[in-house]
Image (cartoon, coloured by chain):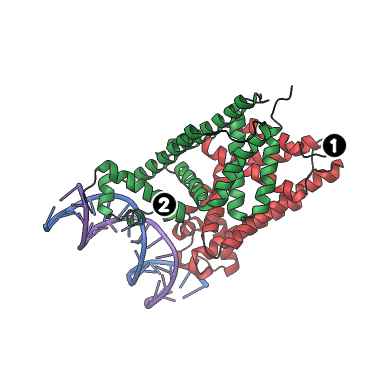
Chain colours: A green, B red, C blue, D purple
Amino acid sequence: MARMSVAHRREALVGAALAVIERDGVHAATTRAIVAEAGMSLASFHYAYASRDELLEAVVRRVVDGYAAAEADLEIEGPLEVESLVRSAITSYVELLRADPAREQGMIELSLYSIRTEGLRTVATAQYAAYQDFTESVIRRIAEVTGTRWKVPTPLLARMVTTMTDGLTLGYLVNRDDEALDQLTELVVAALMQQVERD
Amino acid sequence: MARMSVAHRREALVGAALAVIERDGVHAATTRAIVAEAGMSLASFHYAYASRDELLEAVVRRVVDGYAAAEADLEIEGPLEVESLVRSAITSYVELLRADPAREQGMIELSLYSIRTEGLRTVATAQYAAYQDFTESVIRRIAEVTGTRWKVPTPLLARMVTTMTDGLTLGYLVNRDDEALDQLTELVVAALMQQVERD
DNA sequence: GTCTATAGCCGGATAGAC
DNA sequence: GTCTATCCGGCTATAGAC
Protein backbone atom coordinates (compact mmCIF):
# COMPACT_ATOMS: atom_id res chain seq x y z
CA MET A 1 0.00 0.00 0.00
CA ALA A 2 1.13 3.53 -0.76
CA ARG A 3 2.90 5.48 1.92
CA MET A 4 0.50 7.15 4.30
CA SER A 5 1.08 9.33 7.31
CA VAL A 6 0.44 7.58 10.60
CA ALA A 7 -2.36 10.04 11.32
CA HIS A 8 -4.07 9.25 8.04
CA ARG A 9 -3.62 5.54 8.56
CA ARG A 10 -5.12 5.76 12.02
CA GLU A 11 -8.08 7.63 10.67
CA ALA A 12 -8.66 4.97 8.02
CA LEU A 13 -8.42 2.20 10.62
CA VAL A 14 -10.93 3.87 12.94
CA GLY A 15 -13.34 4.25 10.05
CA ALA A 16 -12.89 0.63 9.01
CA ALA A 17 -13.35 -0.56 12.58
CA LEU A 18 -16.58 1.42 12.88
CA ALA A 19 -17.84 -0.08 9.64
CA VAL A 20 -17.12 -3.63 10.80
CA ILE A 21 -18.62 -3.01 14.24
CA GLU A 22 -21.78 -1.56 12.74
CA ARG A 23 -22.12 -4.38 10.24
CA ASP A 24 -21.07 -7.42 12.25
CA GLY A 25 -20.67 -6.39 15.88
CA VAL A 26 -17.77 -5.79 18.24
CA HIS A 27 -17.10 -9.52 18.49
CA ALA A 28 -16.39 -9.69 14.75
CA ALA A 29 -14.16 -6.64 14.76
CA THR A 30 -10.89 -8.56 14.85
CA THR A 31 -7.68 -6.91 13.74
CA ARG A 32 -7.76 -9.04 10.60
CA ALA A 33 -11.33 -8.08 9.71
CA ILE A 34 -10.52 -4.43 10.29
CA VAL A 35 -7.42 -4.35 8.09
CA ALA A 36 -9.29 -6.25 5.37
CA GLU A 37 -11.99 -3.57 5.50
CA ALA A 38 -9.35 -0.84 5.32
CA GLY A 39 -7.44 -2.66 2.57
CA MET A 40 -4.14 -2.71 4.40
CA SER A 41 -1.88 -5.34 5.88
CA LEU A 42 -1.91 -6.62 9.41
CA ALA A 43 1.56 -5.27 10.08
CA SER A 44 0.46 -1.78 9.07
CA PHE A 45 -2.16 -1.97 11.74
CA HIS A 46 0.41 -2.52 14.44
CA TYR A 47 2.50 0.23 13.02
CA ALA A 48 -0.35 2.67 13.63
CA TYR A 49 -1.70 1.24 16.89
CA ALA A 50 0.03 -0.78 19.57
CA SER A 51 -2.97 -3.00 20.23
CA ARG A 52 -6.55 -3.73 19.30
CA ASP A 53 -7.83 -2.10 22.49
CA GLU A 54 -5.91 1.07 21.67
CA LEU A 55 -7.76 1.21 18.36
CA LEU A 56 -11.11 0.58 20.02
CA GLU A 57 -10.41 3.44 22.38
CA ALA A 58 -9.92 5.67 19.36
CA VAL A 59 -13.18 4.35 17.91
CA VAL A 60 -15.07 5.37 21.03
CA ARG A 61 -13.48 8.80 20.83
CA ARG A 62 -14.62 9.21 17.25
CA VAL A 63 -18.18 8.32 18.25
CA VAL A 64 -18.01 10.88 21.03
CA ASP A 65 -16.76 13.54 18.64
CA GLY A 66 -19.65 12.69 16.36
CA TYR A 67 -22.11 13.58 19.10
CA ALA A 68 -20.34 16.85 19.75
CA ALA A 69 -20.55 17.71 16.05
CA ALA A 70 -24.24 16.88 16.01
CA GLU A 71 -24.68 19.19 18.97
CA ALA A 72 -23.08 22.07 17.09
CA ASP A 73 -25.28 21.44 14.05
CA LEU A 74 -28.45 21.26 16.08
CA GLU A 75 -31.37 23.15 14.58
CA ILE A 76 -34.78 23.73 15.99
CA GLU A 77 -37.45 23.19 13.37
CA GLY A 78 -41.21 23.26 13.09
CA PRO A 79 -43.73 25.08 15.30
CA LEU A 80 -42.27 26.58 18.46
CA GLU A 81 -44.35 24.49 20.78
CA VAL A 82 -42.87 22.29 23.51
CA GLU A 83 -44.68 19.06 22.76
CA SER A 84 -43.97 19.05 19.05
CA LEU A 85 -40.31 19.91 19.63
CA VAL A 86 -39.93 17.15 22.20
CA ARG A 87 -41.68 14.72 19.89
CA SER A 88 -39.49 15.65 16.96
CA ALA A 89 -36.33 15.28 19.05
CA ILE A 90 -37.33 11.81 20.22
CA THR A 91 -38.62 10.84 16.79
CA SER A 92 -35.40 11.86 15.11
CA TYR A 93 -33.52 9.36 17.25
CA VAL A 94 -36.17 6.70 16.77
CA GLU A 95 -35.94 7.05 13.00
CA LEU A 96 -32.17 6.72 13.22
CA LEU A 97 -32.70 3.53 15.18
CA ARG A 98 -35.25 2.20 12.72
CA ALA A 99 -33.05 3.01 9.72
CA ASP A 100 -29.92 1.37 11.10
CA PRO A 101 -30.52 -0.88 14.10
CA ALA A 102 -27.20 -2.68 13.58
CA ARG A 103 -25.37 0.57 14.15
CA GLU A 104 -27.08 1.10 17.49
CA GLN A 105 -26.45 -2.49 18.47
CA GLY A 106 -22.78 -1.96 17.71
CA MET A 107 -22.68 1.13 19.89
CA ILE A 108 -24.25 -0.70 22.83
CA GLU A 109 -21.87 -3.62 22.37
CA LEU A 110 -19.01 -1.16 22.32
CA SER A 111 -20.15 0.34 25.63
CA LEU A 112 -20.52 -3.06 27.26
CA TYR A 113 -17.14 -4.17 25.95
CA SER A 114 -15.51 -1.00 27.23
CA ILE A 115 -17.00 -1.46 30.67
CA ARG A 116 -15.51 -4.93 30.93
CA THR A 117 -12.09 -3.92 29.64
CA GLU A 118 -9.48 -2.53 31.97
CA GLY A 119 -8.29 0.82 30.65
CA LEU A 120 -11.40 1.44 28.59
CA ARG A 121 -13.84 1.99 31.42
CA THR A 122 -13.18 5.71 31.64
CA VAL A 123 -13.56 5.95 27.88
CA ALA A 124 -16.96 4.30 28.14
CA THR A 125 -18.18 6.76 30.73
CA ALA A 126 -16.86 9.57 28.52
CA GLN A 127 -18.95 8.18 25.66
CA TYR A 128 -22.04 8.32 27.82
CA ALA A 129 -21.19 11.74 29.19
CA ALA A 130 -20.91 13.10 25.66
CA TYR A 131 -24.28 11.68 24.73
CA GLN A 132 -25.60 13.18 27.94
CA ASP A 133 -24.23 16.62 27.09
CA PHE A 134 -25.82 16.43 23.68
CA THR A 135 -29.21 15.56 25.16
CA GLU A 136 -28.92 18.28 27.78
CA SER A 137 -28.21 20.92 25.18
CA VAL A 138 -31.26 19.87 23.17
CA ILE A 139 -33.46 20.10 26.25
CA ARG A 140 -32.07 23.51 27.12
CA ARG A 141 -32.59 24.79 23.59
CA ILE A 142 -36.20 23.63 23.60
CA ALA A 143 -36.81 25.36 26.93
CA GLU A 144 -35.21 28.60 25.72
CA VAL A 145 -37.04 28.72 22.43
CA THR A 146 -40.45 28.02 23.94
CA GLY A 147 -39.95 29.78 27.26
CA THR A 148 -40.71 26.63 29.22
CA ARG A 149 -39.47 25.56 32.61
CA TRP A 150 -38.97 21.95 33.69
CA LYS A 151 -40.06 20.52 37.03
CA VAL A 152 -36.73 18.73 37.46
CA PRO A 153 -33.14 19.81 36.81
CA THR A 154 -32.04 19.58 33.19
CA PRO A 155 -29.26 17.04 33.85
CA LEU A 156 -31.73 14.66 35.47
CA LEU A 157 -34.21 15.11 32.65
CA ALA A 158 -31.43 14.39 30.16
CA ARG A 159 -30.64 11.17 31.99
CA MET A 160 -34.30 10.24 31.81
CA VAL A 161 -34.18 10.76 28.06
CA THR A 162 -31.13 8.55 27.62
CA THR A 163 -32.73 5.98 29.92
CA MET A 164 -35.77 5.82 27.69
CA THR A 165 -33.94 5.92 24.36
CA ASP A 166 -31.61 3.15 25.53
CA GLY A 167 -34.62 1.11 26.53
CA LEU A 168 -36.35 1.74 23.21
CA THR A 169 -33.18 0.66 21.45
CA LEU A 170 -32.77 -2.64 23.30
CA GLY A 171 -36.43 -3.47 22.88
CA TYR A 172 -36.42 -2.71 19.17
CA LEU A 173 -33.23 -4.71 18.60
CA VAL A 174 -34.85 -7.78 20.08
CA ASN A 175 -38.41 -7.49 18.82
CA ARG A 176 -38.14 -5.41 15.64
CA ASP A 177 -41.70 -4.33 16.26
CA ASP A 178 -42.32 -1.07 14.42
CA GLU A 179 -45.85 -0.56 15.69
CA ALA A 180 -44.77 -0.99 19.29
CA LEU A 181 -41.92 1.43 18.67
CA ASP A 182 -44.40 4.09 17.55
CA GLN A 183 -46.66 3.56 20.53
CA LEU A 184 -43.76 3.58 22.97
CA THR A 185 -42.44 6.77 21.42
CA GLU A 186 -45.73 8.43 22.27
CA LEU A 187 -45.56 7.19 25.85
CA VAL A 188 -42.02 8.52 26.11
CA VAL A 189 -43.13 11.92 24.84
CA ALA A 190 -45.98 11.90 27.36
CA ALA A 191 -43.57 11.03 30.17
CA LEU A 192 -41.40 14.02 29.24
CA MET A 193 -44.33 16.40 28.83
CA GLN A 194 -45.33 15.49 32.35
CA GLN A 195 -42.18 17.26 33.51
CA VAL A 196 -43.12 20.59 31.93
CA GLU A 197 -43.87 23.22 34.55
CA ARG A 198 -47.33 24.66 33.93
CA ASP A 199 -47.71 27.93 35.80
CA MET B 1 -15.84 -37.62 37.46
CA ALA B 2 -18.52 -39.92 38.73
CA ARG B 3 -21.14 -41.17 36.35
CA MET B 4 -24.00 -38.74 35.89
CA SER B 5 -27.14 -38.93 33.82
CA VAL B 6 -27.04 -36.74 30.72
CA ALA B 7 -29.92 -34.72 32.08
CA HIS B 8 -28.10 -34.04 35.34
CA ARG B 9 -24.91 -33.20 33.49
CA ARG B 10 -26.75 -30.74 31.28
CA GLU B 11 -28.28 -29.11 34.29
CA ALA B 12 -24.87 -28.70 35.90
CA LEU B 13 -23.44 -27.22 32.70
CA VAL B 14 -26.24 -24.70 32.36
CA GLY B 15 -25.72 -23.63 35.95
CA ALA B 16 -21.98 -23.30 35.45
CA ALA B 17 -22.46 -21.33 32.24
CA LEU B 18 -24.82 -18.94 34.01
CA ALA B 19 -22.28 -18.46 36.79
CA VAL B 20 -19.49 -17.66 34.35
CA ILE B 21 -21.69 -15.35 32.28
CA GLU B 22 -22.81 -13.47 35.37
CA ARG B 23 -19.28 -13.15 36.68
CA ASP B 24 -17.23 -12.54 33.54
CA GLY B 25 -19.61 -11.96 30.64
CA VAL B 26 -20.74 -13.94 27.61
CA HIS B 27 -17.42 -13.38 25.91
CA ALA B 28 -15.59 -15.20 28.70
CA ALA B 29 -18.06 -18.09 28.76
CA THR B 30 -15.92 -20.43 26.67
CA THR B 31 -16.44 -24.18 26.82
CA ARG B 32 -13.20 -24.45 28.80
CA ALA B 33 -14.27 -21.87 31.38
CA ILE B 34 -17.65 -23.51 31.74
CA VAL B 35 -16.37 -27.03 32.31
CA ALA B 36 -13.79 -25.69 34.77
CA GLU B 37 -16.63 -24.03 36.68
CA ALA B 38 -18.63 -27.27 36.60
CA GLY B 39 -15.59 -29.36 37.53
CA MET B 40 -15.83 -31.67 34.56
CA SER B 41 -13.77 -32.43 31.50
CA LEU B 42 -14.08 -30.83 28.12
CA ALA B 43 -15.08 -34.11 26.52
CA SER B 44 -17.95 -34.52 28.96
CA PHE B 45 -19.28 -31.22 27.77
CA HIS B 46 -19.56 -32.46 24.21
CA TYR B 47 -21.13 -35.65 25.44
CA ALA B 48 -23.98 -33.57 26.90
CA TYR B 49 -24.24 -30.86 24.26
CA ALA B 50 -23.32 -30.89 20.59
CA SER B 51 -22.01 -27.34 20.59
CA ARG B 52 -21.46 -24.23 22.64
CA ASP B 53 -24.44 -22.51 21.04
CA GLU B 54 -26.67 -25.44 21.94
CA LEU B 55 -25.69 -24.93 25.56
CA LEU B 56 -26.27 -21.19 25.38
CA GLU B 57 -29.73 -21.87 24.03
CA ALA B 58 -30.39 -23.99 27.11
CA VAL B 59 -29.06 -21.17 29.28
CA VAL B 60 -31.54 -18.73 27.78
CA ARG B 61 -34.32 -21.23 28.39
CA ARG B 62 -33.36 -21.54 32.03
CA VAL B 63 -33.45 -17.76 32.41
CA VAL B 64 -36.90 -17.73 30.84
CA ASP B 65 -38.11 -20.46 33.20
CA GLY B 66 -36.75 -18.40 36.07
CA TYR B 67 -39.04 -15.53 35.14
CA ALA B 68 -42.00 -17.88 34.92
CA ALA B 69 -41.23 -19.17 38.40
CA ALA B 70 -40.94 -15.62 39.74
CA GLU B 71 -44.33 -14.93 38.23
CA ALA B 72 -45.90 -17.84 40.09
CA ASP B 73 -44.32 -16.72 43.37
CA LEU B 74 -45.42 -13.15 42.98
CA GLU B 75 -46.86 -11.59 46.10
CA ILE B 76 -48.43 -8.24 46.57
CA GLU B 77 -47.20 -6.58 49.72
CA GLY B 78 -47.64 -3.35 51.57
CA PRO B 79 -50.59 -0.94 51.44
CA LEU B 80 -53.08 -1.59 48.66
CA GLU B 81 -52.48 1.68 46.92
CA VAL B 82 -51.47 1.93 43.25
CA GLU B 83 -48.51 4.24 43.57
CA SER B 84 -46.83 2.39 46.40
CA LEU B 85 -47.36 -0.95 44.63
CA VAL B 86 -45.92 0.40 41.39
CA ARG B 87 -43.00 1.90 43.28
CA SER B 88 -42.27 -1.31 45.11
CA ALA B 89 -42.41 -3.31 41.88
CA ILE B 90 -39.93 -0.99 40.16
CA THR B 91 -37.79 -0.69 43.27
CA SER B 92 -37.54 -4.45 43.65
CA TYR B 93 -35.97 -4.67 40.22
CA VAL B 94 -33.73 -1.68 40.85
CA GLU B 95 -32.42 -3.24 44.05
CA LEU B 96 -31.71 -6.43 42.13
CA LEU B 97 -29.74 -4.36 39.65
CA ARG B 98 -27.85 -2.51 42.36
CA ALA B 99 -27.01 -5.72 44.22
CA ASP B 100 -25.70 -7.56 41.17
CA PRO B 101 -25.05 -5.36 38.14
CA ALA B 102 -22.77 -7.96 36.56
CA ARG B 103 -25.68 -10.36 36.40
CA GLU B 104 -27.81 -7.88 34.50
CA GLN B 105 -24.92 -7.06 32.20
CA GLY B 106 -24.59 -10.76 31.47
CA MET B 107 -28.28 -11.02 30.63
CA ILE B 108 -28.08 -8.10 28.21
CA GLU B 109 -24.96 -9.54 26.61
CA LEU B 110 -26.75 -12.84 26.26
CA SER B 111 -29.64 -11.14 24.47
CA LEU B 112 -27.34 -9.26 22.10
CA TYR B 113 -25.32 -12.39 21.40
CA SER B 114 -28.49 -14.36 20.69
CA ILE B 115 -29.74 -11.73 18.28
CA ARG B 116 -26.54 -11.97 16.27
CA THR B 117 -26.42 -15.75 16.24
CA GLU B 118 -28.30 -17.72 13.62
CA GLY B 119 -30.59 -20.20 15.35
CA LEU B 120 -30.70 -18.29 18.63
CA ARG B 121 -32.72 -15.32 17.42
CA THR B 122 -36.04 -16.93 18.20
CA VAL B 123 -34.75 -17.93 21.61
CA ALA B 124 -33.83 -14.34 22.31
CA THR B 125 -37.30 -13.08 21.48
CA ALA B 126 -38.71 -15.83 23.69
CA GLN B 127 -36.54 -14.54 26.53
CA TYR B 128 -37.99 -11.08 26.10
CA ALA B 129 -41.51 -12.39 25.70
CA ALA B 130 -41.20 -14.24 29.00
CA TYR B 131 -39.99 -11.12 30.76
CA GLN B 132 -42.87 -9.29 29.12
CA ASP B 133 -45.40 -11.83 30.41
CA PHE B 134 -44.00 -11.51 33.88
CA THR B 135 -44.30 -7.73 33.79
CA GLU B 136 -47.82 -7.91 32.40
CA SER B 137 -48.96 -10.20 35.15
CA VAL B 138 -47.57 -7.84 37.78
CA ILE B 139 -49.40 -4.92 36.21
CA ARG B 140 -52.62 -6.87 36.04
CA ARG B 141 -52.34 -7.95 39.65
CA ILE B 142 -51.80 -4.40 40.77
CA ALA B 143 -54.84 -3.25 38.82
CA GLU B 144 -57.00 -6.04 40.24
CA VAL B 145 -56.00 -5.54 43.83
CA THR B 146 -56.48 -1.78 43.77
CA GLY B 147 -59.38 -1.63 41.34
CA THR B 148 -57.50 0.64 38.98
CA ARG B 149 -57.82 0.98 35.24
CA TRP B 150 -54.98 1.97 32.93
CA LYS B 151 -55.25 4.48 30.10
CA VAL B 152 -53.39 2.19 27.72
CA PRO B 153 -53.58 -1.57 27.10
CA THR B 154 -51.69 -3.69 29.61
CA PRO B 155 -49.32 -5.20 27.01
CA LEU B 156 -48.22 -1.74 25.92
CA LEU B 157 -47.75 -0.60 29.49
CA ALA B 158 -45.68 -3.72 30.15
CA ARG B 159 -43.46 -2.85 27.20
CA MET B 160 -43.05 0.64 28.60
CA VAL B 161 -41.92 -0.87 31.88
CA THR B 162 -39.33 -3.10 30.20
CA THR B 163 -38.22 -0.13 28.11
CA MET B 164 -37.54 1.89 31.22
CA THR B 165 -35.96 -0.90 33.26
CA ASP B 166 -33.67 -1.77 30.35
CA GLY B 167 -32.68 1.87 30.13
CA LEU B 168 -32.07 2.12 33.86
CA THR B 169 -29.91 -0.97 33.61
CA LEU B 170 -27.69 0.24 30.79
CA GLY B 171 -27.27 3.62 32.42
CA TYR B 172 -26.38 2.14 35.78
CA LEU B 173 -23.92 -0.31 34.25
CA VAL B 174 -22.01 2.55 32.65
CA ASN B 175 -22.23 5.23 35.33
CA ARG B 176 -22.69 3.29 38.58
CA ASP B 177 -24.40 6.37 39.94
CA ASP B 178 -26.63 5.34 42.84
CA GLU B 179 -28.10 8.76 43.44
CA ALA B 180 -29.11 9.14 39.79
CA LEU B 181 -30.62 5.66 39.93
CA ASP B 182 -32.86 6.71 42.82
CA GLN B 183 -33.96 9.89 41.10
CA LEU B 184 -34.62 8.10 37.82
CA THR B 185 -36.63 5.47 39.63
CA GLU B 186 -38.94 8.19 40.90
CA LEU B 187 -39.34 9.60 37.38
CA VAL B 188 -40.14 6.14 36.10
CA VAL B 189 -42.80 5.69 38.78
CA ALA B 190 -44.25 9.09 37.87
CA ALA B 191 -44.34 8.15 34.19
CA LEU B 192 -46.31 5.01 35.04
CA MET B 193 -48.67 6.77 37.45
CA GLN B 194 -49.50 9.12 34.60
CA GLN B 195 -51.13 6.17 32.88
CA VAL B 196 -53.58 5.49 35.70
CA GLU B 197 -57.14 6.26 34.69
CA ARG B 198 -58.67 8.74 37.17
CA ASP B 199 -62.44 8.69 36.82
C1' DG C 1 -19.15 -43.07 29.79
C1' DT C 2 -15.36 -40.62 30.98
C1' DC C 3 -11.03 -39.39 30.48
C1' DT C 4 -6.38 -37.38 28.17
C1' DA C 5 -4.46 -35.89 24.14
C1' DT C 6 -4.63 -33.57 20.03
C1' DA C 7 -6.40 -31.88 15.65
C1' DG C 8 -7.47 -27.75 13.30
C1' DC C 9 -8.53 -23.09 13.23
C1' DC C 10 -8.43 -18.25 14.33
C1' DG C 11 -6.94 -14.71 17.23
C1' DG C 12 -3.24 -10.79 18.48
C1' DA C 13 1.18 -9.59 17.93
C1' DT C 14 6.00 -9.69 15.92
C1' DA C 15 10.37 -10.81 13.03
C1' DG C 16 12.79 -9.88 9.34
C1' DA C 17 13.10 -9.25 4.23
C1' DC C 18 12.79 -5.52 1.07
C1' DG D 1 7.54 2.09 6.09
C1' DT D 2 5.43 -1.69 4.31
C1' DC D 3 5.15 -6.11 3.33
C1' DT D 4 4.93 -11.61 3.95
C1' DA D 5 5.67 -15.18 6.94
C1' DT D 6 5.36 -16.86 11.38
C1' DC D 7 4.94 -17.39 16.44
C1' DC D 8 2.12 -18.55 20.07
C1' DG D 9 -1.91 -18.90 22.70
C1' DG D 10 -6.79 -19.98 23.17
C1' DC D 11 -10.69 -21.66 21.07
C1' DT D 12 -14.21 -25.58 19.53
C1' DA D 13 -14.59 -30.05 18.60
C1' DT D 14 -13.09 -34.91 18.19
C1' DA D 15 -10.26 -39.28 18.41
C1' DG D 16 -9.04 -42.97 20.88
C1' DA D 17 -7.42 -45.15 25.33
C1' DC D 18 -9.46 -47.09 29.36
x and y percent of residue B159 in the render? 69, 48
Q: Is residue A172 visible?
A: yes
Is disc 2 on the same chain as disc 1?
no
Q: Can the viewer see residue A166 in this picture?
A: no
Q: Position of residue B185 (x, y in %)?
A: 66, 34
* Residue bearing mark 2: A19
Q: Is residue B195 left or right of residue A47?
A: right
The secondary structure type at the circle numbered 1 is loop
Q: Is residue A179 above or below residue B2?
A: above
Q: Which mark is residue B198?
A: 1
- The relative height of residue A141 versus residue A4 in the rendered view (above or below) is above
**Residue at screen point 85% across, 43% down:** B145
Residue C12, how many percent across, how many down? 33, 51
- Tell me which chain the residue with mark 1 is part of: B
Chain identifier of the residue bearing label 2 in the image: A
Q: CA distance from mark 1 to mark 2?
A: 50 Å
- Residue type marked 2: Ala
